[in-house]
Amino acid sequence: MATINAAPPQLLTMADLKGKVDPDWCPGCGDFGVLAAVQKALVELQIPNHSVATVSGIGCSSNFPGFINTYGMHTLHGRSLPVASGLKLANHDLTVLVTGGDGDGFGIGVGHFVHAMRRNINLTYMVLDNQIYGLTTGQTSPTSRVGMKTKSSPYGSMDTPVNPLTLALSAGATFVGRGFSGEQKHLTELIKQAIQHKGFSFLDIFSPCVTYNKDNTFQWFRPRVKKLEEDAAYDSTNWIGAMERATQWGEIIPIGKFYERTDLPTLEETEPVLDDMPLIARDLHIPEDVAKQFVEELM
Amino acid sequence: MSETFTLGIGGAAGQGVATPGDIFALIFSRRGLHLNAYNAYQSIIRGGHTFLTIRTGVDEVTNQGDGMDLLIPLNQDTMDRHLRLLTDGGACIYNADSIKPGEAAAGVQLCPLPVSTLADITRNKVAQNTLALGASLSMMGVGFNVLEGVFQAQFGRKGEAVVNENVSIARAGYEYATANFKPFARPLPMTDKRYAVLAGNSAMAMGGAAAGVKFYAAYPMSPSTGVLHWMAAHGRKAGILVRQVEDEIGVVNYTIGAAHAGVRSMCATSGGGFALMSEGLGLSAMAEIPIVVIDCQRAGPSTGVPTKTEQGDLWQMLGAAFGDYPRVIAAPLDIADCFTLMPEIFNVTDKFQCPGIVLCDLLLAEGRLSVDPKILDFKPHIDRGEMITSNGDAHDEYLRYKITESGVSPRAVPGVPGFTHVVSSDEHEENGVLISDEYTNHAKRRAMMEKRMRKEQGIAAMVPPPVLKGPPDADVTLIGWGSTDGVIREAIEQLAEQGIVANQLQIRWLVPLHGDAIVDILGKAKHTIIVENNYSGQFARYLRSETSFVANGHIRKYDGEPFMPHHIVEAVREQLAGSTTLSVPTHEVMV
């Protein structure tokens, strides 16, 4: 297969990252802020958009790849991580961003979420968490609070919500953070760090649903979120400390980088087949002497 | 088929049936003989009943045959189950210390080995197997020195002492048999040919490697796990990335992700795992990302009989994923074809950017066959279709799903400057923008459906129609698909000996089916019978739905075991005599 030519050196701008269509999210949706923060992060990091793949599942926030000009994949509900993992392993030169919602990632896709983290594959997974199913017009989600009334839980949600951060920490994610769509600058910084992190980076991002979630609104979050970065004593290399902060919820909800470890190799680094070149650059035919050996084994 | 020699070795799982089986297979293939091996077993690691049949001969051996020449029971259970398979001229070699022979047919030679006097059984737990191996070779007229080389290959890694111990035990068996037992009427022949012996699973894995597969994902599931094992053992040497992932939903989606990056990518499973992959197949079709999925059928439904064969997944394949979409489904005809089919199907799926299914079954997947090593061609023709892998001309408006006459749109892979686009499971416009959320558009939806479905015409032109084999004016035409090819062929030889002329139409490409060509052939047939390994006649129903053709009769088997030639012969005879139109042969041996 022909090799991929290097891009002409050109400065990446916000305009370059504009998708073919404008987002169709409800006016005021938290997802706008996340999209803008991702675009800003890519511009600030100057990662050419042709070398970025944005992979999503299904749901409001999973329409994300259509609104940003990169190589986009809008896959199946809950399956963004396996698709993104296959893509990354076949061409590890790409920067692979994965986006989706809480239903997509913590409901139908939670099995893939856990396994992707324990593999430490170099993906950046951003869950635009609105604690509700939006595109299906308002049902309880894995992060809905107990007692939340929705169309599918008219008497209040009964299931204990998933804590995405403690789940990620216990599954072995090597970068765990939480952002808020209403804190643009902070979120952009967090996304930049997550992209630059070598290994699986996970960001749970509060992205309020202005139509169906009347409990967890921008107004509800704003006074509660407290940046970990403002706490000089906070050590994001301390896993136990991260677990403690991750369980804090109520009047104070921490956001920021909870945890990062940089001493573990990524899956791509561990896999010798990927040592010399990405899979897509490999010769289609396997070497003659190797093929000969495979046949001789059978004789 | 010329004369063949069949031996059966049976015992409980864990008693060591596999090792003498491998040794016999190696001896036969090194003698330039063809062979076909089939292992009947259960989903158990220790215990149960395992029965390995190896049939060998100078010509190609297409199936396990009907009878048996040599039985080696490693326990009483095997003796009790299988002794009656032996007919005049056959022999049974067994451990006289622990196994009592049953009632044998006239002319069957019972060969008791005094195992505890011939070998130190406290030292070597499988001494009875090795003694029987030596005794067998003596009776087959094979020189003893062959064994030394084979033991070296088999046990060399364990050290010289292990090799020597096995050689000396086998020699004791060999010499005892030479002195006490009557050799078989015809010594085992020998040719100057050399064959490779492999299972269908290895063949499909190697075929994939030859086709240029660079990514393989799997979740273990019998009887497809052998593909994963070959890939895991050889992937690093071949430059193939092999991943075992969390479940089959993950498997198919990893495969799609890697294929989208631009590599040839495949996965394998069985019916239950395939059910989980169904939605992914639709994604492959809708996003136009080519993948190949192997389904090794086992007896269903549900968990079914994991270690038994069936051709019961056809309608699952035909109905996999919702909506209409182009795809190909092919059933390999034998183990050699498990290899050769892979590059062929990849060329179709790449060219038409659609999913392809290899519909294999346990009989081929886990069976073993000798093949001419020339068939294992690692430089097959590869056609990757229209791909854009370098930036070329600058594109202001690249249309990933450009509407074309062929239905195929040039595919840019991620990483190429100037061709960014979105691929989607949602319906989309030519440029990838969704026509499902913000707005819908019936005219665009129709055009896009028609674009995708137009690929079917190109696929049909690329895939050859089936060919009738045998005399065109035969008394009866036997129709089969996939793995029944060999057994039907032998049944036809047996029918000819009985004065019944039969021909054969074996289907390899199930989708596209080439219904017109099939009806053209079958319309001229005198009497048509469809042979298949399932209850409801899945292929018969498919053929009828596609062509309105109804066969005169059916031979079906759904007990988990494959057909033996005589099952088909007897069924054809009763159907030609007019006594029935549906025959369900009984499998006579309890395995």
Image (spheres, coloured by chain):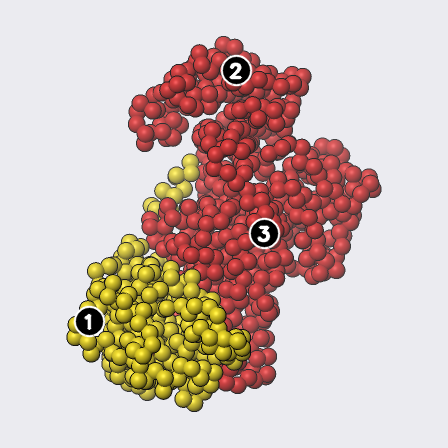
State whether residue B507 appears in this view.
yes
Chain letter for mark 1: A
Mark closer to the chain start, 2 or 3: 2
Q: Residue at x 69, y 35 (%)?
A: B566
Q: Image point 58% across, 44% down: which residue?
A: B305
In the picture shown, does residue B41 fall above or below B292?
Answer: above
Colour that chain A carries in the picture: yellow
Q: Separation of disc 2 and disc 1 at Cα?
A: 77 Å
Q: Which residue is mark 3?
A: B302
* Residue pictured at 58% horizontal, 62% vertical: B320
Q: Residue furthest left?
A: A232
- Where the C terminus of chain A falls, by quadrant? top left
Residue B167: name its quadrant: top left
What residue does disc 1 label? A234
Q: Chain of mark 3?
A: B
Crowdedness near tag 3: few (<14), some (14–19) or many (≥20) residues, C-alpha within 10 Å: few
Asked if residue A175 is positioned above or below residue B178 in the image, the reply reads below
Residue hosting label 2: B96
Indicate the colour of chain B: red
Residue A155 spot, x, y in % from top left: 53, 76
Q: Please tell me whether mark 2 sits on a helix, a strand or a loop.
A: loop
Specify the farthest residue to the right.
B578
Q: B524 or B125, which lies in front? A: B125
Q: Nearer the viewer, mark 2 or mark 1?
A: 1
Classify 10 Å Cα crowding around label 1: few (below 14), some (14-19), many (20 and above). some
Q: Amino acid at mark 1?
A: Tyr
**Quadrant showing the N terminus of chain A:** bottom left
Residue found 56% across the figure and 36% down from its top: B40
Q: Position of residue B89 (x, y in %)?
A: 62, 19
